[in-house]
Every structure is written in C-alpha cells, then in structure tokens.
Image: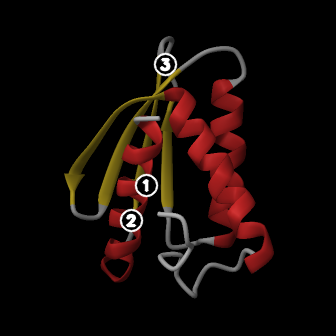
Amino acid sequence: MSDLAWVPQSCTLPAEERPLRVAEWDALFAERLAALSRPGPLRLRLDLIGGPGVEERVRDLVEREAGCCSFFSFTITPGEDLIGLDIVVDEEHEAVLEALAMRTAAAGHR
C-alpha cells in the first residue's frame, strides 16, 4: 500500500508526518515480525522478535500512535525472545485494522 488513503480522518497526526510514521512501523515489521494472527475481526496479534532496545522501540511507537489515533488499543506483552503486540479497534475502524494487517504482512515478507 503505497498511499495513505486507508488512514482514517480521525487520525490527528499531521498529514506531512504520516509517511514517516508509516515508515517507522514498516521498518519494525520488516526487521522484527515473527508471526501475525487475527484472533477476531477487531483484533490483530503480532509476535515481534526481541533483542536489545526492541521493547523500548515498540513502546515508543505505540505511545506515539495512541496519541494521534485514539481508536487503537495496544497491549504489549514482553518476553525473553518475543514481544507480543495486540492491536484492537472498535467496529467503526475494522477496515483500518484490516489494512494495517495487510501492510504488516507485506512488510514482514520483505
């Protein structure tokens, strides 16, 4: 997904900063994605490969994302080798989560 049309209007991140934020998420997923699952239509579960500084990187991104896209709910589950990241949305934003899941899967295959 090269354009940002899937980003909802409710996102308060300034439009000029959105490509940079998406690039940060894409880089994280390309480097660290171990597994992706959809336990339900409103929930995305990611397992990220741990390592020095990875949990802090995830926490920083999650905090900034939650600040501009309040419709996301994030839960981080730290682990020795894997860091779990659950992302939940309300029904109104199911399509956003689906787009994020597709983008995450694509980035993880690079």
**Numbered disc in front, either 3 or 2:** 2
The structure residue drawn at horizontal position 63% and vertical position 57%, both measured from the top left corner, is: 22
The CA span between labels 3 and 2 is: 27 Å
**Numbered disc in front, either 1 or 3:** 1
Amino acid carrying mark 1 in the image = Arg
The residue that mark 3 highlights is 79
Q: Is residue 105 above or below residue 35?
A: below
Q: Residue 45 in the image: x percent, y percent?
A: 34, 43
The CA span between labels 1 and 3 is: 24 Å
Label 3 secondary element: loop
Q: Is residue 52 above or below residue 1?
A: above
The 10 Å Cα crowd at callout 1, few under 14, some 14 to 19, many 20 or more, is: some
Residue 99: give its label: 2
In the image, 80: left or right of 91? right
In the image, 10: left or right of 24? left
Q: Residue 34 in the image: x percent, y percent?
A: 39, 26
Label 1 secondary element: helix
Quadrant hosting residue 18: bottom right
The residue that mark 1 highlights is 103
Q: Residue 21 in the image: x percent, y percent?
A: 70, 58
Most distant residue in the bottom direction: 9
